[in-house]
């Protein structure tokens, strides 16, 4: 069984990532440049510094660290954290925190918001950065999050026109620009392979994709029953995985890093293997 609990750090397409994600044991992935964390299965002092946590679902290896995170920030005099959870879990999350207030005698100040696919989570004061919520396919209520940058560009049909022509159109009241959303990163959390058909997932420059099982030690059928992705699913859906960068997360503790790398080297098509890295 692979060692777990050791924080991993990497930079992908200019985005720094740090944390731990091991299937069934713990997941907490920080994105320091965006000042947020995906999930909080168990915290450390670096995650305490992050005041925004976007939860994908409520399995303990993804959410059990929430009360500790909240209490530790309060102890250290930090601002109350903000949490986002799938909307069906909102009441139960609040009840969990109330139970911990009663058990610990602590105030546990925080904000919590329920989200559904399609929702926008603002991450700056100008609306230029945010997280777009998308569907995932797990055995418990779940969502994924896409980190999006909004920018303004010239409408495609006007590209190449001289400045005088553009100015004339603008003076005539014509809108010559349009707002576009660039998906910088998508984080799936736990999900079945159907997530590969989600537009936010397909458009992401960096895709943090669950890949829990790699070989026959767990069958494809068992992976599907548990709501996880098996390597066989990727081999059958290569046409969807066109992202420039794919980071495999949530790998089962059955595999150590060297073994996992050997399996991926042997089985993945070379074009996909060149774009896929392990977060382990």
Image (tube, rainbow, N blue to C red):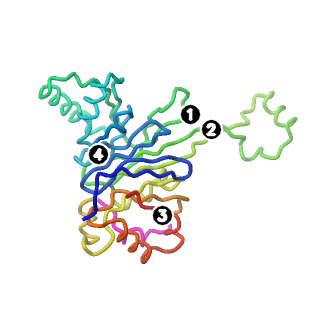
Find residue 78 and report its horizontal and vertical position in percent: 35, 24
Q: Residue at x 32, y 62 (%)?
A: 212
What stretch of residues is rendered in magenta? Answer: 228-240
Q: Tell which circle, 3 or 1, labels the residue nearer the N-terminal end.
A: 1
The residue labelled by disc 2 is 151
Q: Secondary structure at mark 3?
A: strand
Q: Are marks 1 and 4 in contact (CB under 8 Å)?
A: no
Q: Residue at x 48, y 59 (%)?
A: 246
Q: CA distance from mark 4 to mark 2?
A: 30 Å
Query: Residue under circle 3?
Result: 276
Observer-nearest residue: 17 or 206?
A: 17
Q: CA distance from mark 2 to mark 1?
A: 7 Å
- Magenta region includes residue 123: no
Location of the N terminus (image quadrant): bottom left
Which numbered disc, 3 or 4, marks the residue that appears first in the sequence?
A: 4
Q: Nearer the viewer, mark 3 or mark 1?
A: 3
Indicate the quadrant where residue 42 lies.
top left
Q: Are marks 2 and 1 in contact (CB under 8 Å)?
A: yes
Image quadrant assignment for residue 190: bottom left
Is 276 situated left or right of 227 in this image? right
Q: Earlier in the sequence, mark 2 or mark 1?
A: 1
Q: Secondary structure at mark 4?
A: loop
Mark 3 or 4: in front is 3
As measured in the structure, the alpha-carbon distance from the residue carrying label 3 to the one carrying label 2 is: 28 Å
Q: Residue at x 49, y 69 (%)?
A: 273
Q: Magenta includes 234?
A: yes
């Amino acid at each position: 069984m692979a060692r777990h609990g050791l924080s991993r750090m990497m930079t992908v397409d200019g985005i720094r990532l740090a944390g731990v994600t091991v299937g069934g044991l713990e997941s907490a992935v920080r994105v320091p440049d965006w000042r947020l964390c995906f999930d909080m299965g168990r915290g450390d002092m670096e995650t305490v510094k992050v005041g925004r946590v976007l939860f994908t679902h409520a399995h303990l290896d993804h959410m059990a660290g929430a009360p500790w995170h909240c209490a530790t920030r309060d102890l250290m005099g930090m601002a109350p954290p903000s949490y986002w959870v799938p909307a069906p879990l909102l009441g139960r999350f609040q009840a969990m925190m109330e139970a911990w207030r009663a058990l610990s005698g602590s105030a546990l100040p925080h904000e919590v918001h329920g989200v559904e696919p399609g929702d926008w989570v603002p991450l700056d004061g100008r609306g230029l950065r945010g997280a777009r919520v998308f569907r995932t396919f797990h055995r418990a209520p779940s969502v994924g999050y896409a980190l999006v940058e909004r920018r303004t560009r010239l409408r495609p049909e006007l590209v190449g026109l001289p400045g005088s022509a553009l100015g004339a159109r603008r003076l005539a009241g014509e809108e010559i620009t349009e707002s576009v959303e660039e998906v910088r990163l998508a984080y799936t959390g736990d999900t079945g392979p159907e997530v590969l058909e989600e537009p936010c997932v397909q458009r992401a420059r960096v895709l943090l994709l669950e890949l829990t099982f790699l070989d026959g030690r767990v069958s494809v059928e068992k992976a599907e029953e548990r709501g996880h992705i098996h390597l066989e699913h990727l081999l059958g859906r290569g046409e969807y995985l066109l992202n420039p960068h794919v980071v495999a997360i949530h790998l089962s503790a059955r595999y150590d890093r060297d073994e996992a790398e050997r399996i991926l080297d042997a089985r993945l098509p070379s074009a996909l293997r060149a774009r896929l890295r392990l977060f382990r």
